[in-house]
Amino acid sequence: MLSHPYCIAVRSITPIPPLSAANRAFSQGDFSAARALYAQAMSVYPDIAHLVQGNLDLLARRSAQACHLPVVPAQPATHLPCTALVIAWDVGHNALGRAYMLAEVLARVVRHVVLVGFQFPRYGDAIWEPLRHSCIPIVTLPGQNLPQFHDQVRRIVQRYQPDIVVACKPRLPSLELGLLMREQWGCPLIVDVDDHELSFAPGRTPLSLEALLATPAGAAPSTPAPYGELWTRLAHSLCFKADAILVSNPALQAEFGGTVLPHVRDERNFNPSLYDGAALRKAHNVPLDAKVVLFFGTARAHKGLDVLARAVSEIDNPCFRLLIVGGSVDHKSQEALQALAPGRILWLPSQPFSKIPDILSMADIVCLPQDENHPTSAYQLPAKAIDAIAMGIPLVVSATPPLQQLIRDGVAHPIPQSGLAQLLTKLATGRETTSHRQRECFLHQYSYAAAASTLRGVVTECLAQPLRMQPAIGPTLIRASLHALGADAAHTPKPFASQGTDIVVFWKQNDTCLYGRRHDMVIRYLASRPDVRRVLVFDAPMSEHDLHRMQQHQDTVHQARHIYIYTYQKLLGVFDTEKISYNVFVYPPGTYSIDPASQDKPYLNTGFIPYLRQVFEREGVDPSQSVFLVYPKLYPIVEILDVFRPKRLLVDVVDDHRAWPHVSAQEITRLTEHYRDLVGRADMVWTNCEPVRMSMSQYGKNVHLVPNGCDESPPTKPPSHCTAFQAFLARPGKTIGYVGNLESKIDIALLDTLCTTFEDCKVVLIGSTHANRDIVRLQRHPNVLMPGVIPYQDVGAWVRQFDVGIIPHLRSPLTRSMHPLKAYVYLAHGVPVVSTDVENIDTHCPSITVARDRDDFVEAVRITLLRGTRQRNVDRMYVQQHGWSARLGQHVDQLLANP
């Protein structure tokens, strides 16, 4: 019997039958069964891989010992104390793949890695499908055309300071951002080159800034996309201004210099002993007796699929099949390939990165033919070649320069001038003879462990060396591109308005823009007013340590990854508008204490206050002439008010934090003094409900009841590329829906009854479970859908499908101080509401039914469902009368009118 802590950790999550069985087999020492069950579990639940990684590592070591395979090289115990920014020039297609790989390797080297990339409409409106649900979250930036792209990059650079930057591919979007980061902050820049980008363009000569300036003005008016041919030629020459260059193979090294860092794979996941090929063939309808020749990747003209199809068709053995996995094969091309090998070709759609080992486990041979005369082939090392080596699959490749090393190392076979069919037949029966050599080569040259060692050396050297002095590139780059585009040489970003009051908002949490909370609606309303000039928004300060923990979180019904992505999008200005600027103070781990009495570290405001000054200066805001809008609890704000002395102070009290569960007596005392101080200072106080108004009135004057309201124009566009939403629409039955964090205020027993009573209905619970893990047990009901957090811009499409919106809250001190915003979310979308008998519900609204007890709640839901869709739309007049403009208008008028 073995004991291993990961078994306990995995068993604590929602039960997954194959995973539970795998843990039992692991604990009993039945490693063969454990490997097969882990593979089965990950095939169905790809997001759990991180939870069982310790077990997988131990299994891999035991398998290596049993088979006399080489063991993974040991990793350095410490991370370099820095943050790396990895930039992909576009996230909508396979340009993202190499950037993601580097980010995963860098995560073994540095303290924290942030992966960002531009989303250009030409390549879609979503992250590239294989990485859409990746382990490392991908922070997307809207891709704009020139010259607006320059303004976007300039603003990003002003807002965020990494320690080191990796720009992936010599393309202008990633390179310009990297170069300007280097200029602004003095952080080293590494440029990664994994393809000869000019081989994709008709004009294959580099172009310098000087040469671009020498061209006639307006010579390139039709190429405003920063990834176009002209700008790629320019980027080719600019990449040599980096502090270090990485290349994926020796062919590229011969032209660009730098350090070779090939395509690599994670040795913990790419281990053939962890996968059951027969079970995976069954899952994908691949015949068990087939000899599978695999082509896995993006099908392009230079990749020779026609050669491979002909070879398979020539093999006499009818069991041979060509399995093509991936996108970019149009219907006409599919028909042509089928004609070359009738009945021999199998197709699978694009697969996520996490499924690559599964797919390879079904193969007998991997064959990667390429057109050796195509310019791209001369510099491209296909990542799928490394996949095959990692998994011990016989590999056949074209003898292009980047692949020559694999052939020399004896881990790949060259495609012969003739006789490819005979070679495939021979290799299909001799796999075992090459697997040991391939695994050894993989671990020492093409694994994450090997790459991390190389990358650690490059990063360490970059950080240790002073930056090379060189002329500022940014102004010249902008001037040259404007000259080529024939744009106004005096192009500048649109200036801010000169009239109106500036308002500075301090939110108590880190979820601005995500949920459409009360403060989000207030911010949007304030920005809509002509007498408001600018709205600066500050989320609560965050340690990078907390962000790193959120980055590692894989639970799909937890808010962590959303908070992580939205925080960096706010840092990089993604949500900014003409009048609103969103900001977050993110500080290195261990730098500050949140306790002002601490003697070990300086207090948080030591860094927060200078950051505020920097943002005020950047945004042209004078805090002493501004209105500060503060949401308690936010303890650092008292000193901030003393330092900046705003013209007016508005305090908006959302809930009474003293009523939250598990608040200690000491914390209640501190909160009371916090409320007393802020309300006593305030020129105006808003409260969300009558109990809170009465509570705050004892601390100061001018306390107003400002209830929550309806969004008069809520977003309703269906989310794109959302499999959960499509699955929701596809399921039959009426919908009982809930939106909001699934906290302890939820009556789980009532929801249990609803699920059982209305078995033919969908019960959709939208929200994070981070504060109430007990609610996850409701997933045992087959009619329950828990899609996790749905951002506000997408949630309207879900809510509009509800037949009834529910508020199943328990009566408690917490709900007594709340005014459920979700009621107005439902009403704004024309959905009738059924609520428990909690306080602060509008009992006068004809579309809200308040139930006396659980039985009454179930009956109210039944009646509402029976009314049908024709009678479900609420009165639009109610929405307008109780909209945010109506709620806030007179109070803001009064606030801004006061001298």
Image: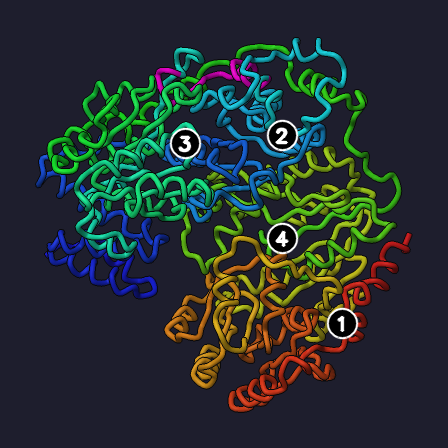
- How many marks are shown on the rendered structure? 4
For the residue labelled by badge 2, is the local secondary structure a helix, a strand or a loop?
helix
Say which residue appears at 45% left-offset and 84% top-offset.
753
Label disc, if present, on residue 879 of the rendered structure: 1
Residue 511 sits in quarter: bottom right
Residue matched to label 4: 512
Relative to 506, does residue 463 appear above or below in the rendering? Answer: above
- Looking at the image, tell me whether mark 4 or mark 3 is earlier in sequence order: 3
**Residue 346 visible in rendering:** yes
- CB-based contact (under 8 Å), mark 4 and mark 2: no
Kind of residue sitting beneath label 3 = Leu
Q: Residue 469: horizontal and vertical position, in percent?
A: 57, 10
- Looking at the image, tell me whether mark 2 or mark 1 is earlier in sequence order: 2
CA separation in Å, label 4 and label 3: 30 Å
Q: Specify whether residue 250 is painted magenta.
A: yes
Rendered-image quadrant of the N terminus: bottom left
Relative to 510, does residue 664 appear above or below in the rendering? Answer: below
Residue matched to label 3: 102
- Give the label, 2 or 1, closer to the camera: 1
In the rendered structure, the answer to whether residue 812 lies left or right of residue 318 reads: right
In the rendered structure, the answer to whether residue 236 lies left or right of residue 333 reads: right
In the rendered structure, the answer to whether residue 824 lies left or right of residue 88 reads: right
Colouring mode (rainbow / by chain / secondary structure / one colour):
rainbow
Q: Residue 518: horizontal and vertical position, in percent?
A: 68, 61
Say which residue appears at 29% left-offset and 48% top-offset.
343
- Give the label, 4 or 1, closer to the camera: 1
Viewer-closest of 639 and 67? 67
